[in-house]
């Protein structure tokens, strides 16, 4: 109980700092407190390090290269401040594996699932935030021939893919180094590959079944709905209406976990 108590205190402190830094809005801070309490309190300091690595690196990249991203904000469904749906979409599955850890204290798979989930969402975040640095327009992942505007769901590029690999590898290194037991190289390889696979799966969903809209005034594709940044109402052009970016992120983490556990 003492670990859970101190874990909740730590989670509250981190959430307040993130809220004051405008990395989280009010709902996001509350959600992060819950996710952090489960991971810090039920997992321990090793689990906390992986979560903080994802959160700090992703928040820093969201603020980086603002000039290059200025014209892309109209494409994304939300801004850089994460709300509760984004927190649960990125960290909900990891929190679940942290909650399973006390029930299976001697098993390695909760740690592997936890690390793979974070590796996948970290890889996806790095690809999204750094992919804009690619000098040419990205290509649609489904055929690699059709070029799309930067920031378009389902678009992939060399810089974005390398960034995805680096984001997954960062979590993979820590997962191997901090693993309760097992071979470092094995954990590193599995978590890194699972993270990259999750990120690519995210792009595949983005190109096929994720809900996508178009602003009739700006004549641009966007994830924003029902209103675009210009104030005009957006019209759905493809995908499943219920499958928004937050749910795609959750699926990204889930696919990473699936790949890791199967490997």
Image (cartoon, grey):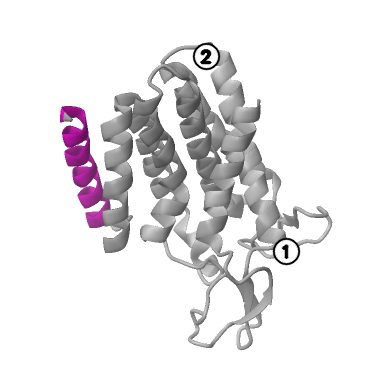
Residue contact between numbered discs 2 and 1, judged by CB atoms under 8 Å: no
Across and down, in percent, residue 26 comes to 26, 62
Q: Which residues are magenta?
A: 2-21
Judged from this view, the residue extending furthest toward the front is 103
Residue identifier under label 1: 148
Of the two numbered discs 2 and 1 on the same chain, state the one appearing first in sequence: 1
Q: Which mark is residue 229?
A: none
- Quick check: can you spot residue 162? no
What is the crowding at mark 2: few (fewer than 14 residues within 10 Å), some, or many (at least 20)?
Answer: some
Q: Is residue 239 magenta?
A: no
Apparent side of residue 258 relative to residue 87 in the rendered image (left or right): right
Residue 14 forms part of the magenta stretch: yes
Mark 2 or 1, which is nearer the eye? Answer: 2
Q: Residue at x 83, y 54 (%)?
A: 143
**Which x, y percent locates residue 15?**
25, 49
Q: Quadrant of residue 260?
A: top right
Residue 262 seen anywhere in this rendered image of the structure: yes
Question: What residue is at 59 percent from the left and 29 percent from the top?
Answer: 192
Q: Which mark is residue 184?
A: 2
């Amino acid at each position: 109980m003492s670990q859970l108590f101190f874990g909740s205190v730590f989670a509250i402190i981190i959430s307040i700092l993130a809220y004051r830094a405008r990395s989280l809005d009010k709902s996001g801070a509350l959600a992060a407190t819950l996710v952090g309490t489960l991971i810090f309190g039920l997992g321990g300091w090793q689990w906390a390090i992986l979560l903080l690595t994802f959160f700090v690196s992703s928040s820093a990249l969201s603020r980086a290269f603002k000039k290059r991203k200025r014209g892309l904000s109209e494409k994304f469904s939300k801004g850089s401040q994460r709300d509760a749906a984004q927190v649960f979409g990125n960290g909900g599955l990891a929190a679940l594996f942290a909650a399973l850890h006390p029930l299976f204290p001697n098993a390695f798979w909760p740690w592997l699932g936890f690390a793979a989930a974070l590796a996948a969402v970290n890889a996806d975040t790095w690809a999204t935030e750094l992919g804009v640095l690619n000098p040419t327009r990205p290509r649609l992942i489904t055929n690699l021939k059709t070029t799309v505007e930067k920031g378009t769901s389902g678009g992939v590029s060399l810089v974005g893919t390398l960034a995805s690999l680096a984001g997954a590898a960062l979590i993979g290194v820590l997962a191997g180094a901090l693993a309760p037991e097992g071979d470092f190289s094995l954990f590193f390889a599995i978590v890194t590959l699972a993270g990259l696979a999750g990120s690519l799966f995210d792009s595949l969903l983005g190109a096929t079944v994720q809900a996508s809209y178009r602003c009739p005034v700006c004549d641009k594709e966007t994830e924003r709905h029902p209103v675009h940044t210009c104030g005009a109402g957006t019209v759905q052009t493809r995908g499943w209406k219920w499958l928004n970016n937050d749910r795609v992120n959750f699926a990204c983490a889930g696919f990473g976990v699936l790949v890791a556990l199967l490997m």
